[in-house]
Amino acid sequence: MLMTGSFAITNVNIVSEDAKDGLLHGYNVVVGPDGRISKVGAGNRTGIPDGYHRIDGTGRYLLPGLINAHVHLFSNGKPLSATLTGPTFQHAVSAALHSPLGALLIAHRTKVNARTLLLSGVTTFRTVGDVGYEAVRLRERIESGKELGARMLAAGPLLAITGGHGSPQIALIGDSPSQNRKNARTNIMHGVTAIKIAATGGVTDARRIGDAGRPQMSEEEMAAICEEAHHAGLLVAAHAQSPLGVTMALRAGVDTIEHGCAMNSEIIDLFGDNPRSLRGWSALIPTLSAALPLVKLSREVTGVDEIVVANARIAVDEMVQGIHDAKENGIALGMGTDTAMTYVTQYNTWRELALLNEYGDLTPQEAIHAASAENARILGFDQVTGRIAQGLSADLLLLKRNPLNDWRAYEHPEFVIARGRVLQNPQIERFELVDNELDAMKA
Ligand SMILES: [Zn+2]
């Protein structure tokens, strides 16, 4: 069923930070023909205009659609083959991806993966590293109404140094402030709505233990990128996995640190007060979903080598400490998963909330906040989405069970509503082997 606007969800439990037990009981949420929430109220059903369709929310749970601040759309999350990430075939793979046929294939996969994200309850997301401009084009089709989809920010290729994280497959390469400035301008010319930097090495393509967090891009190079992005009104995300890498990125004016690390006082201060960032502050987007399976699952299952496991272990320890430090110091803390990485499917965003609870000591309420209202604020959408409030976009998730005490409530949403468009019982193609391994993953 696809229905747009002019409906009301009646007598529903709203998952809310304002309520004692986390739930507002017996509420009606009215959605106007423009796809925005026109009324949120308790009690009787007066105030629902005649002719509005009614969705009975009795015994159901309503919360804002999830916001995922860190996704890639070029793959579906089944284990990435070592040939894709290993040094031998890296350039051949990159050439194939960037060929005309490869571009068609990637554009198709991007569309399918974006659709899966939406059907799983993610109504807003940001891509942070694409092969080319396929996600940028998809965003434009969605915004023009040609295609049903989530609200998107799309980064296009990330910006990296020669041999840097993500290069050459999903990166534009620059080795000086002026080259990196030019690459930022190139992306902006192609219509990106976000900018992503590889500030340090990454787990998937590091060659030696310790390389994952090693600084790659210089502070001057990152500052040049930030300047261009900020002039265009765009936020800059930086992949950064060590204290030195994070410090350099924050000093350069990066707006969101992806993955993160244990924080010292300089890092804590820079997050809260970052003069070169777009808005004067920066946020942390941890991605436990990407790093934990590499550490917790056996290598036969993940197919990665010992170096990847060792680097993932370091990344997990840094990330977990970073989450605790962010929480303790009132640093803006969002949520991302790094979809398309090994074992990070496009439909398991909810698992990150459970991991934030299990490893980051966030309460279920705090995890939902990070994935909705706070992510909206971090991505600049707080006047648009992220809460169930009058005037905001009807980006909603209706669940049969209470997500505050049952993470699996997210697995099969009864309704996903995006900008007032209603998707009932969305069906998703799942990968049983991947899900079984994730289910069995022990702390
Ligand atoms: Zn990523």
Image (cartoon, rainbow, N blue to C red):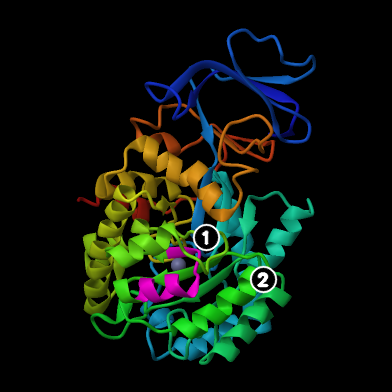
Mark 1 Cβ and ligand 1 under 8 Å apart: no
| Image depth: mark 1 or mark 2 in front | 1
- Residue 334 at what x, y percent from top left? 44, 52
Main SS type for the magenta part?
helix
Residue shown at 45% from the left, 26% from the top: 18
Instruction: Give left or right: position of 374 versus 247.
Output: right
Instruction: Give left or right: position of 187 versus 294.
Output: right
Residue shown at 67% from the left, 38% from the top: 393
Tell me which amino acid carries mark 2: His
**Among the two numbered marks 1 and 2 on one chain, the one whose residue lies closer to the N terminus:** 2
Secondary element type, mark 2: helix
The residue labelled by disc 2 is 231
What residue range appears in magenta? 245-257
- Residue 3 at what x, y percent from top left? 73, 33
- Residue 168 at what x, y percent from top left? 51, 85
Q: Is residue 290 visible?
A: no
Tell me which amino acid carries mark 1: Gly
> In the image shown, does 140 or 236 lie closer to the viewer?
236
Q: Is residue 206 visible?
A: yes
> In the image shown, does 263 or 12 lie closer to the viewer?
263
Are the two marked residues, 1 and 2, in contact with CB atoms closer than 8 angstroms? no
Residue shown at 67% from the left, 22% from the top: 8
In the image, residue 189 above or below residue 115: below
In the image, residue 262 above or below residue 419: below
Q: Which mark is residue 280?
A: 1
Instruction: Give left or right: position of 26 versus 23.
Output: right
Asked if residue 248 lies in the magenta stretch, the reply is yes
